[in-house]
Amino acid sequence: MRVADKNITGQSLRNIQKNRSDMSDLSNQAATQKKITRPSDDPLASSRVLAARTDERGYKQFIQNIAQAKSFLEFSEQALGELNDSLVRAKELAIAQSTDGGASEETRRITAQEVGQLFSQSVQIANRKLGDRFIFGGFQTMKQPFDTEGNYAGDDGDIKIQVHKDAYVGVNMPGSKVFLGKGIEGDGVIRTSSDTPKTVKELQEYRKEKKEIELDQQEEEKHSIQTRGLASEGTITRLSNKDPITEDKGLNVFKVLKGLEISLKTNDKVGVQESMDLIDQAISQVVLARAEMGSRVGSLNATTESLQKAVVDNKGLASQLEDADVFQLVSDINKTESALKATMETSSKMVERSLLDFLR
Amino acid sequence: MSKVGAMMDVGKRSLQNAQTGLQTVSHNIANKTTEGYSRQRVELSSMPPIGVGNIRIGMGAKAGAVTRANNPWLEKQIQKERTGLGFQNGRADSLARVEQIFNEQQNKGLNQYMTQFFNAFRELSNNPESLSSRTMVKEAAQQMADDFRRVNAQLVDVQDDIDGQISSLTEQVNQASKEIATLNEKILQVEAQGTHANDERDRRDLLVKNLGEKIEISWAEGKDGQVSITAGSTAILVSGSSATELIAQRNATRDRAEILYRSNEYGSTFQITEQFKGGQLGGLLEVRDKIIEDSLKSVDEMAYTLAREVNSAHIEGHDRYGKPGVLFFDMPDTAKGASGKLQVNKTVFNDVGRIAAGNKQDAPGDNTIANMISGIQYRATMEKGTATLDDFYNAGVGELGTITQRARSTQEAQKNIVDQMSTLRENISGVSLDEETTNMIEMQKMYDASAKVIKTADEMLETVLNLKR
């Protein structure tokens, strides 16, 4: 075959360039420790890396959200625990003062004072703050939800926090429910409103629902009947489990305590006895609320674990897809380097000799 | 009967032939590295012998013509493959730049800024009362909008750059066609005298190949040795000794450089941009008008959808002051160009209290709207409700990566084809020093020997002249 000088130089140049460009790719990989330095290096892998990173960042945020949610829930739960203690104390006092055996008008009047203290202690609990947020005010986190009389200034807002792609968890328990017993359903469990609106349409439905509930509550309040008259200042104290009008199961903790206090003050033995039942109901209302919060914390712990695992998995996936295999890389570099050396050597031999060198 | 004079003649011609040969050798050596050069050689043929009686005496050799070693079919094929190479070059090189815009392997990009934006709203929903989480939302939104505009601007930059390349390409094309027309004339003149216009043809072949790499051409050589060249399907660039220019000009309808052609000086111009599907020009046009336009459309679509979804949720809410929510982003009128205009609304920008996190009025702890907005990330808002923003973007990056990867491998393959053909061409037409040296020695020997012949003839003549003394 006829070989022209241009062939030799051209070929040498091409070979060297090929080796050099391989070398530059490899050293780039070594410097970045990544085998994908741009999408076209491996399009499929690079878009999966992007997705894995998005997921990872989202999950990390969820873990952060959960930490916040947990502190809110745990703090609320602790407050309700104290409320529970107050109620138990009130029950003890009520039992002691319910018969004429060991109690008299005198002891009842003294006990009434302690019950009054329990009342204001409960109001204080209801006004607890986490950071600068009131935890029992519903959405009204910036103003004190209860006045000294136990009148509610908050709302029934459930603060929801995203803990996973499609999961939202309520972190608070509005005072209207746990302290006032409004909107507690048949089984006595305090639930957050089931759905979190995600679109404008869902938001409008959510608003409609809220409005209806509000109207219902106004209606109920308007028609509420005093089920017991004696010495109760407009209380809704009652004896059956359900309110005869609203069929609500919840009751107003403050009014129960206030009722006991008044019964004690007025030396109303029957009233004190009835209060015992009501305090029992109040205790179970608070216990259920605590249990609900505890179960939310439990499920959040489980979610955190799965999120942490997902973060690790995503990191692993991304690393597997984009990180360079260092041993492979080093061996490739060595191979390419020796190829480059060999190419240079042969090229220099090919280029330097011609017939002219042998003609003297 | 043989004559001493004839012998002298043969020797003299041989001497001349050797000189011609040596000169051709030196011409070859001198053009060893000239691009497109075909080695030349002197075609020697024996002179018709003279018959004397029943013997025929050879009369030496004559130099027929200086020809070039060249395979025109191979040249034509190389020209075609180089059109392909030009296309792949134009495409792959500008694609690499487009790809870089979406490359998040090493630095932050849209994907990351979008996640950051939604995470900021999640942080806000953790603590809607706090001013610092509101400021975070503003910062994240600002950065995301900046990055949308960065992507848009960089894509347009590449388009502008391609426009510039098209202009200079057209300039080079016009230069080449002018030179080809001149060479056409020269070749006609030279070859009319019955000689070969070797160097002119080499140069013209090279120019045609270079031209074909830049734009798609069809060409043919006429009987008179002149080539006519048509660019695209209608623009006649070279016909005989006249060349017509292509014009690259921005036009008003879309403010992009277009290729115009005017058949004669007074004729009207025609826009023929669409005719170019091959060559470097074709590759550049494809990236500019198709790939980048598609990318812009996708990014616009994303920016528009994002602004629309965020705004529609935001205006439903109430801000820190109990006022109804305003638009969060300045709403672009149409999807087209939305990515270049995405901007956080001034009202929100100047006062983060105006960010509406809640649904209810005067409920500082309400985070319903913040939840709705952060939820947009996982909602299928793109592609008629089949893909989330992230899905859409990641798929887009993957697709661009695939196109770029394929472009690069095709470019590599096409380069190999052209290299192989060029090797073939050099095998035939390239200069080999070894060969030239051998020829040189041969010719030199011939020169020496011919001189010897003349000397011998001279001595013979002298011998004859001395007979009489």
Image (spheres, coloured by chain):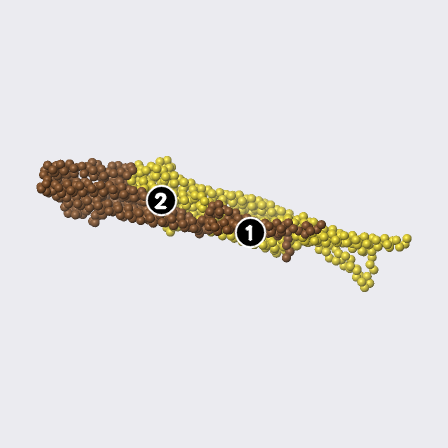
What color was chain A assigned in the picture?
A: brown
Query: Residue B346 versus residue B274: which sits nearer the camera?
Result: B346
For the question of whether residue B300 can be seen, the reply is: no
- Kind of residue sitting beneath label 1: Ala
Judge left or right: residue B141 versus residue B425.
left
Which residue is rendered at x = 75% and y = 58% of the image?
Answer: B46
Judge left or right: residue A182 versus residue B8.
left
Secondary structure under tag 1 reads helix
Which residue is rendered at x = 57% and y = 44% of the image?
Answer: B171
The residue that disc 1 covers is A339
- Residue B126 image point, x, y percent: 32, 42
- Residue B285 image point, x, y percent: 51, 48
Using a 10 Å C-alpha cutoff, classify the residue at mark 2 as few (fewer than 14 neighbours), some (14 to 19) or many (20 or more). Answer: many
- Kind of residue sitting beneath label 2: Gln
Nearest to N terminus: mark 2 or mark 1:
2
Judge left or right: residue B323 versus residue B146.
left
- Residue B5 image point, x, y percent: 82, 55
Nearer to us: label 2 or label 1:
1
